[in-house]
Amino acid sequence: MNWSFILGIILLFDIFFAIVVVFVERKNPTSALAWLMVLFFLPAIGFVLYLLFGQNYTRRKMFTVKEAGDRRLKEIFEEQHRDLVDSHFRFANPDAEPYRDTIFALLQNNRAFLTENNRVEVYTDGKEKFDALFEAIRDARHHIHLEYFIVNNDELGRAVVHALAEKAREGVEVRLLFDAMGTRAGKGSKKAFHELTDAGGQIGVFFPSIYRLNYRNHRKIAVIDGAVGFIGGFNIGDEYLGKGPMGYWRDTAVKITGQAASLLQLRFFLDWQFTTKESMEVVEQYFPGVEGSGTTPVQIVSGGPDTRWNPVKEGYIKLINSARESCYVQTPYFIPDESISDALRLAALSGVDVRLMIPCKPDHPFVYWASLSFAADLLDAGVQVYTYDNGFIHAKTVVVDGKAGSVGSANWDVRSFRLNFEANAFFYDSAVGSEMKRRFIEDLAVCTELTPERYAERPTLIKIKESISRLFSPLG
């Protein structure tokens, strides 16, 4: 075998992809430099890694159809958008007034329309969350729409599919959308959904090109009869009930009853239409205009490769910048860019009580060691960092001053900000905010603070792991 010839071919590939990185994709400089290092210092595998993780030069072409669909459906809400931007809008709940600039920024950035009559219930335990979801499924009369990154073929996954199939047999419209990569990794397959499809339910498989590890649909959404919605961090699988190798699973999701469910419905419509090419009609049965009994203002904010900017990340930054007393963040993966790090650091230096909670053990070692390194960077500014010791924390939340915050699927990392499709609920209500803050403080009882002294004592092997993981963290 002519190894010199093979090496020459590999180097040609690496040079070609290096040219693409610099002149075609125009990645941000940090990401571009990281990829150039991979291509030239790991030539034998660099181009393979790039094919799996890096290429996005076809992104605009890939999502042209989706963007067109977004425009058509979102025209329905254009009138409300103009009214909110152009008029002197008065908030029904005065808790929203201090966050007017955040609300309008998300309106204009992401067309994240504000709804005000919502009742929001917070779930931090998997059993409680899925009990509520099963109850909502049982009560469905017209349709059930579920969209999850992972639907495992395990006890919980089969129970969800069975519950959906039962409703389909009753004549309820059932649509289940899942990501091809996430559900494949979660031991799922189309065979696992035969009971549902045989009963008349429909499934959609998002982005079946599983060799691409980027552009995954990471959202976790459920909408029942257009009136009740769920959004958060829980996927569908036994580990989310604490039955997996990570132990107890601490996550966060919210149940929303009110008009914000219509915005979750819109998000599902867009993703379902893109995935299945089924053109769904926007009619009253799907958008009933529910007058909820609550008073919580909510915006549903979506981000992904099809958005011009990074709406969820920018919403996080606006909330951090609005904090006057406290800013509490929970995330399993903390690989921020400079804008996020600077916002947290400046808030802490300004006297805001900034606290960050991350896992004490990794489900993805590479990401874990990078997260630990980036979190430690904030210690000198006065940010208090905690590792969650009671199993695994998977929540993706922020709450500021106990008055406003966000719950959803977006981690505080570059993948969620740039490469995956995400959705979060932003709320502006002291009742929900104080509940979120209370639960964060309760979690501190099962956490260990990462002090500068403790961090400095870490073993040399961990320092090496952190340095290597941090070096490659900008890839994407």
Image: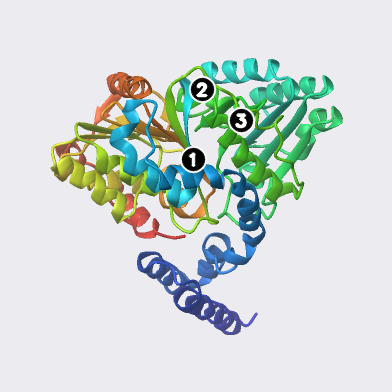
Q: Nearer the viewer, mark 2 or mark 1?
A: 1
- SS under mark 2: loop
Q: Which residue is mark 2?
A: 242
Question: Could you say which quadrant of the image residue 130 lies in?
Answer: top right
Task: Name the amino acid, label 2.
Answer: Gly
Q: Is residue 170 above or below residue 271?
A: above
Dots 2, 3 in contact, CB < 8 A = no
Q: Position of residue 399 (x, y in %)?
A: 33, 31
Number of residues whose C-alpha sits closer than 10 Å to that of mark 1, classed few (under 14), some (14–19) or many (20 or more): many
Residue 113 disc label: 1
Q: Position of residue 9 (x, y in %)?
A: 59, 81
Q: Which residue is mark 3?
A: 222
**Which one is nearer the viewer's eye here, 353 or 265?**
265
Q: Is residue 30 above or below residue 215?
A: below
Report how far apart the C-alphas of labels 1 and 3 lie in the structure. 19 Å
Report how far apart the C-alphas of labels 2 and 1 lie in the structure. 35 Å
**Which one is nearer the viewer's eye here, 31 or 5?**
31
